[in-house]
Image (cartoon, coloured by chain):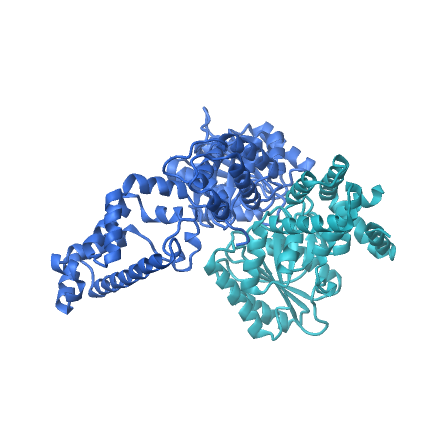
Amino acid sequence: MAFEGLADRLQSTIKKITGKGKVSEQDVKEMTREVRLALLEADVNFKVVKDLIARIKERAIGQEVMESLTPGQQVIKVVKEELTTLMGGEQSKIAVADRPPTVIMMVGLQGAGKTTTTGKLANLLRKKHNRKPLLAACDIYRPAAIKQLETLGEQLDMPVFSLGTEAEPVDIASRAIEKAKEEHHDYVIIDTAGRLHVDTDLMEELQQIKATVKPDEIFLVVDAMTGQDAVNVAESFNEQLDITGVVLTKLDGDTRGGAALSIKAVTDKPIKFAGMGEKLDQLEAFHPERMASRILGMGDVLSLIEKAQSNVDEKQVKELEEKMRTMSFTFDDFLEQMGQVKKMGPLDDLMAMIPGANKMKGLKNAQLDDKQLSQVEAIIQSMTKKERQDPSIINGSRRKRIAKGSGTSVSQVNRLIKQFSEMKKMMKQMTNMQKGKKGKGGFNLPF
Amino acid sequence: MGFMDKLKSKFKQNEETEDVSQKYQEGMKKTRHSFSGKLNDLIARYRKVDEDFFEELEEVLITADVGVTTVMDLVEELRMEVKRQNIKDTNGIKDVISEKLVEIYYGNDNEEIEKLNIQQEGLSVILVVGVNGVGKTTSIGKLAHQLKKQGKNVVLAAGDTFRAGAIEQLEIWGERADVPVIRQNAGSDPAAVIFDGIKAAKSRRADVLICDTAGRLQNKVNLMNELSKVKRVIEREIPGAPQEVLLVLDATTGQNALSQAKTFSEATDVSGIVLTKLDGTAKGGIVLAIRNELKIPVKYVGLGEQVDDLQVFDANAFVYGLFADIATED
C-alpha cells in the first residue's frame, strides 16, 4: 500500500512524549499534523479534515492522560471519538410506507454499483424483512443495463419490470408502481442510470421521477474509493434530490474509504449500507465505528486494549511471563491462555482489531475459526495430567487414545504437539531477545 | 520567455494541435476552472511566500487528488527553489509551480510511450483491465470505434463472463462500431474466451484484438491470478503479445488509484492507463501521482459519453488545459 496507517505515522511522535501526565499543546500540534496527513491520505476531504482537526485540538489539549493509556493513545482516542460522532450511529433501517408499495430510488454516478446494489437490496428485503420487492429497470441509456438487472432478477428469482430502452424513465417508474399495486409487491426498487451530478438534463430527469413516484427512500450509491470529489458529488445529489441515505459500495477493497466521512459531513445523511463483495448477499449494515478505525488505518486498537484490560487478570499475566522465562510453560497453561483469549470474543474479531494483521503474509490466509479452537481444547483435555506437564512422554499409543478421546485424528494431535513445541522454542527466543535488547523484538503494539 | 508562453507557442505550431487542445479545454473546463482558479485565488490572497502559503498550496493540490506523497515532495522542492532564487512575492512563484508540476508529469519518460502500440504487420492484442465500474467495456467500445475508423480490422473478445449483462453490453458496442464480438456463455472461463478470440482474430486476419475482462478489486488474490492466467494465454498464443495492457482508472477515484495501478501492474504488467470520467468535477490529479510514483503513462482519457469522447492522451494539451487560466491572465 502506498500509505501507512495513522498508528505507524504517530509512532515516532509518540515516542517522544510517552510518560507524560498531561497532553501539552506542543504534543497535540505535532500529532494533529500526522492525523491530518493520515486523514488526507485516506481521501477525507480537506475541508472536513480542517474542521475535525480544529475540534480535536480543542478537546485534546490539557487533557489528563488516562491511567491505562499513553498520551499518544489518548490523542488517538479523541480522534476516534470525533470521527465516530461525526459518522453517527448505526442506521440500517429502511422506510416503510403507510400504504404499500414502499418506493426506493437508487441514484449515483456511473459505475458506482447501483444495479448490483439494487439486486442486493432486494435480496436483503426478502431475506431479512420477508418482503416481496419488484425491481424497475429505468436505466435506458447504458447498453445492456436492463439486461443486467433482468439477469440479477433471474438469479434472485425476483420479478423485474422494464419497458425496453424506448420508454421514458419516468413512465417506467410509475408503471412499475402500478404493477406492484396490482400484484401486491410491498417494495419497488427503482434502478436509475448513472449520471454526473453536473449533468443538468439528467439530474432533472431524476427530479421528475421523484416528483412522480414520491419515493420513501432515495439512496445515493457511492464508490468507497472516491477521492476528494466525493463532497461535490454528495452535496450536489443531496441538494437536487434531498436523498434519504447513502450506500457505500466496494468496501471489500483495500481503500481506506475516507469518502464516507466527507459524504456524511456535507450531507448529514446516514450511510445505511455497505457493499462487501460481488455476491448478492454481500450487502451489510454500515458500522460507523469500524469505518472510523479503517479510515485511520489503525484497526480497532482501542477496543482491543479495552477488551484486554477488562478480561485479562494482571496477576495471571505476571505468572505467565515468569513461566515463559523459565520455560515451564505447559499444556495446562496453554489451555488457560486459550480460555483468556476466548473470553475476549470471536477470534476473527480480535484479528480484525490488530492493525496490519490482515496484511501479514501468513495470517492473511489463516482460517481462524473458533471451531478449531475448541478442537484444540478437546485434544488437550483428553491428555492426562502427566502428559500435559511433559508432552515428551506422549508416544504412539497415547496419541491414538488422545485422538479417540477428543474426537480428532492422530495427525491433528501430532500437529498440535509439534506446534506447541515450536511455540515453546519461540518463547525462549523472545525472552532471550528481550533480555538482550530491551523493548525490541517480541510483540509490539504499534505505539 | 515564460513557461506558459513556451507552451502556448508549442500549440501554435499547427492547426491539428490547436484542435486537440480545444477539445481538451472543453472537456477539462470544470477541472481547469476549479484547479487553476484556486491556484490564482491563492496567489492573489497571499502576497508573501510564507509557511501559510505553502500549507494552503498543499491543500489545493491535495484537493485535486494529486496524492499526499507527491504533494509533499513537490512543496518541499518549491521551498528550496524559493530560497535559491530568493523569491519573495507570490507572483514570482507562479512559473516555478507550473514548471515543477510539468516536471513531475513528464519525468524522464520518453514521450513516445504515450502512443498506443499497434503493430503495422500482424495481430496486436490489447488487454483491458481494472476494478469494477471504471468504464472498461465503454472504453473498449469507443476504442474499437476509433480504430475501425482508422481502417483497422478489429475483433472484440467478451472476457467479462462474470458480471450480469456484461457480454450483452459489449455486443451492443460491437454492433455500434460494426466489429465482431467473440463470446461464450456467462460463467465460462475467461481464459477460454480470450483463447477463442485469438483464434478468431487470427483466422479473420484482424489487426487488433481487444480483450474485455471482468472488473475486480485488486486485493482479491484469486481474481488477480485469474487475470495473470489470461495474460499468459495471450503470451503463449502470440509471441510478443499483448502489445498493450490498458488499466482503466476512474478519475473520481482517490488515493486507491495508486494501489490499483501498482497491483494490476504486478499481475499483468500494465503498459498504459485510460483515465475515464474526466468530464465531471474530479480533478484528475491522480495522473500526476501515477506518473510520478509508478512511471505508467496515460494513453487515453474519457471526456464524455459519446463515442468520440475517448481522446488520445496528449500530455501537453492536458497540462495546458490545467493551466490555461494562469497563462492567459498575464
Residue depicted at 20% across the width and 60% down the height: A408
* B190 to B34, vertically: above or below: below
Taking B256 as reference, is A268 above or below it?
Answer: above
The quadrant of the image that shows the C terminus of chain B is: top right
Chain A tint in image:
blue
Looking at the picture, how far across and down is residue B25, in whole percent? 78, 47
Residue B249 spot, x, y in % from top left: 61, 53
Residue A242 versus residue B160: which sits nearer the camera?
Answer: A242
Question: In this view of the protein, which residue sits in the foreground, B89 or B307?
Answer: B89
Which residue of the protein is positioned furthest toward the top in this rendering? Answer: A98
Near-viewer residue (A125 or A283): A283
Residue B147 appears in the figure:
yes
The cyan one among the chains is B
Q: Is residue A256 left or right of residue A381?
A: right
- Residue occupying the point 58% across, 57% down: B261
Residue nearest the viewer, comparing A398 with A172: A398
Q: Is residue B140 visible?
A: no
Where on the picture, by quarter, is residue B195? Answer: bottom right
Residue B320 in the figure: left or right of residue A206: right
Residue A399: quadrant of the picture: bottom left
Task: Name the spot of residue B325 as percent of width and height, x first.
Answer: 79, 43
Q: How many marks?
A: 0
Expressed as whole percent of the image width and height from the top left, the position of residue A342 reads: 27, 46
Q: Is residue B130 left or right of residue B117?
A: left
Q: Is residue B30 above or below residue A383?
A: above
